[in-house]
Image (cartoon, rainbow, N blue to C red):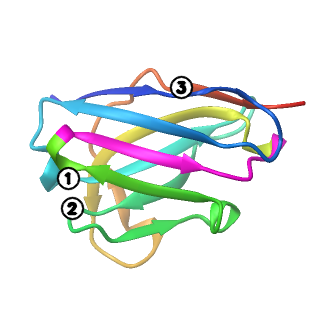
Amino acid sequence: QVQLVESGGGLVQPGGSLRLSCTASGTIFSLNAMAWYRQAPGEQRELVAIITSGGYTNSAEFVKGRFTISRDNAKNTLYLQMNSLKPEDTAVYYCSAGLYSGTSLASYRRTSSWGQGTQVTVSS
């Protein structure tokens, strides 16, 4: 059973930056593809970015050029560096472990349960 703990959220002004972290346990972290999702109030949860065990990354168009996903296998930790934040980035952000077998975001399949998420609020 994989346990995921997200952290690093907070209140930031438009144009600002945040780095989210996700620490995993109960799994061989380095073997998993990992992903960040987000869910805004009243909206469905959406996939933001993925990173494979080999370091390949892919991200949604609405964050390309602003968000960067990375991982530190020695620390069992996943990151999401978020720059040039916009009010529409306001959401609860969740990480997940899963499988990735293609070249599009649709190829990612979550296999872990959800963590508690971390709230990101972009507002002046």
The reply to whether the C-beta atoms of the residues labelled 1 and 3 are less than 8 Å apart is: no
In the picture, measured across the screen, residue 14 lies left or right of residue 77, that is right
Tag 1 or tag 2, which sits nearer the N-term? Answer: 1
Quadrant of the drawing holding the N terminus: top left
Please tell me whether mark 3 sits on a helix, a strand or a loop: strand
Amino acid at dot 3? Thr
Residue where numbered disc 2 is placed? 53
Residue at the farthest bottom position: 103
In the image, the segment drawn in magenta is 75-87
Rounded to the nearest angstrom, the CA distance separating label 1 from label 3 is: 21 Å
Disc 1 target residue? 32
- Residue 90: x, y in percent? 73, 36
**Earlier-in-chain disc, 1 versus 3:** 1
10 Å crowding of disc 1: few (<14), some (14-19), many (20+): some
Q: Residue at x 25, y 58 (%)?
A: 99
CA separation in Å, label 3 and label 2: 23 Å
**Distance Cα–Cα, label 2 vs label 1:** 6 Å
Spot the residue most to the front: 16
Callout 2 touching callout 1 (CB < 8 Å): yes
- The location of residue 5, given as percent across then percent down, is 35, 25
Amino acid carrying mark 1 in the image: Asn
* Residue 65 drawn above or below residue 33: below
Q: Which mark is residue 118?
A: 3
